[in-house]
Amino acid sequence: MTSLERRCRRLLARWYPAEHRALHEEEMVAVLLAGARPGQARPGVRDTFDLVRGGLTIRVRRGAGAQWRAAVDVAALLVPVALLLGALARAVTFGAAAWQPPFADDELRQFLRILTFALPYAVVVLLAWRGRAGAAAACAWAYALVILGEHVWGSVSASVTYTVVGDGVLLIGGVPVDVGGMAMSALPLVLCGAMLLLAPSPGPGPLGGRRLLWWMAVLFGGAVAGAAISSRWAYPPVWALAVVAAGVALRSPVGRRALVVLLPMVGVYVGGLPGAGHLLNAVVLGALAAVVLGVTAWMARVAGKAPAPSRVGQTGQ
C-alpha cells in the first residue's frame, strides 16, 4: 500500500460512516489514485476538501439532520413571535401606568405609540406562519430601516449634546449619532429576517400551531397579570414563563436544537456582554449569530436535500 493510498483510507475512516465505507471505499480510493500525479504522497487540497464535505454531508443527513431542520424552522418563527410579545409586554407596562390613578396622558400616548410599533411584528409573524418567508424577511428588514431612521431623527432633533465621541457615538454633520445603539436596536429584526430566509420552511413544525398559540396566550396573559399588580411587574412573569418554556423544550431533541439556534437572539434580549458598549455587543452578537445560523442552517438544508454528487467518486455519495 502506497503512502497516498494509506492517507486516503485514513481520511475516509475519519469522516465517513463505516457502512458507507463498506460499500464505496474501494471505488473512492481507486478514483483518488487514478487522478493522482506520479509520485504524489498525499491527497491534494481539493480532493481533501471534497472528501471532508461529502463525509460531513452524509453524517448530517443520516444523523440528526432532520431534527436540525425542524429546529431551524421552529426557531425562525419563534423569533418574530418573541419580538411581538416583547413589544406587547412593553405596551402593557405603559397601559397599566396610564390607567392607574391618577390618569396619565403621557403614558397613554406611549402605550398607543408602542402598540402601533408592534403591528409590523404581527405582520411578520402572520407572513411567516403562512409560509411566506421571503415576504416576512423583507418586512422585518424594512422595519429595521424604519427603526434606524427613527434613531437618526431622534439624534438630530434631540437637545442633548455629546461632549465625548466614543462607544459607538459618531459625529455626522456635527450631529452626534449613537451608531452602537442603532445597531443593537436593529439587530433583532436583522437576525429575524436572516433566520426566515435561512430556514428551509419556517413554521410551528413539531411544536404545533395550537400549542404555540397557547404559549403565546400564556406569556401575554402573564404580562397582563403582572401589570395588573404594578406597571413594573409586566416583565418578570414573562421571563419566568419563558424559562419554563425553555425547560420544556430541553426535554425534546428538536427543542434543544431550537434553543441553540435561538442563542444569538437570547444574547440580544439580555443586553449582550455585561459592561460592554452597544457597538462591541453588536459586533460580538452579530459574529455569534453568523456562526450559529450559518452552521445550523447548513445542517438543516443538507437534511432536506438529495445527495449531491461528489467530484471524488460520484457513487460514493
Image (spheres, helix red, strand yellow):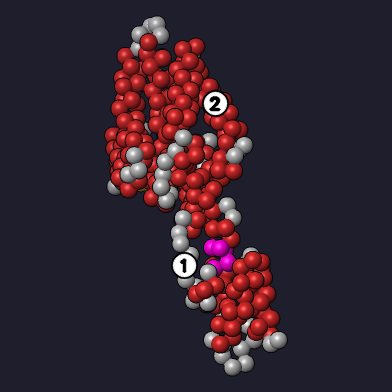
State the image coordinates of residue 264 (x, y, percent, origin top left).
51, 44
Q: Are marks 1 and 2 in contact (CB under 8 Å)?
A: no
Q: Is residue 82 above or below residue 145?
A: above
Residue furthest out toward the right: 1
Which residue position is annotated with label 2?
A: 241
The location of residue 172, given as percent across then percent down, is 32, 47
Of the numbered discs in the image, which one, if any, rests on residue 14? none
Q: Is residue 188 visible?
A: no
Residue 55 is left or right of residue 206, and the answer is right
* Residue 7 within the segment the image draws in magenta: no
Kind of residue at badge 2: Leu
Q: Residues within 10 Å of mark 1 (few under 14, many from 20)?
A: few
Q: Quadrant of residue 78?
A: top left
Q: Earlier in the sequence, mark 1 or mark 2?
A: 2
Question: As drawn, which residue projects farthest toward the front?
Answer: 23
Going by the numbered disc 1, the residue's amino acid type is: Ala
Image quarter for residue 29?
Answer: bottom right
Position of 275 with respect to 116 (left or right) is: right
In this picture, residue 33 sits left or right of residue 87: right
Identity of the residue drawn at 53% across and 77% down: 313
Give the residue displayed 34% in from the left and 30% down from the top: 118
| Residue at image mark 1 | 308
Query: Of discs 1 and 2, which sits in the foreground?
Result: 1
Magenta segment, which residues? 54-58
- In the foreground, 167 or 11: 11
Query: Which residue is at the front of the view, 289 or 282?
Result: 289
226 is higher (above) or lower (below) than 130: above
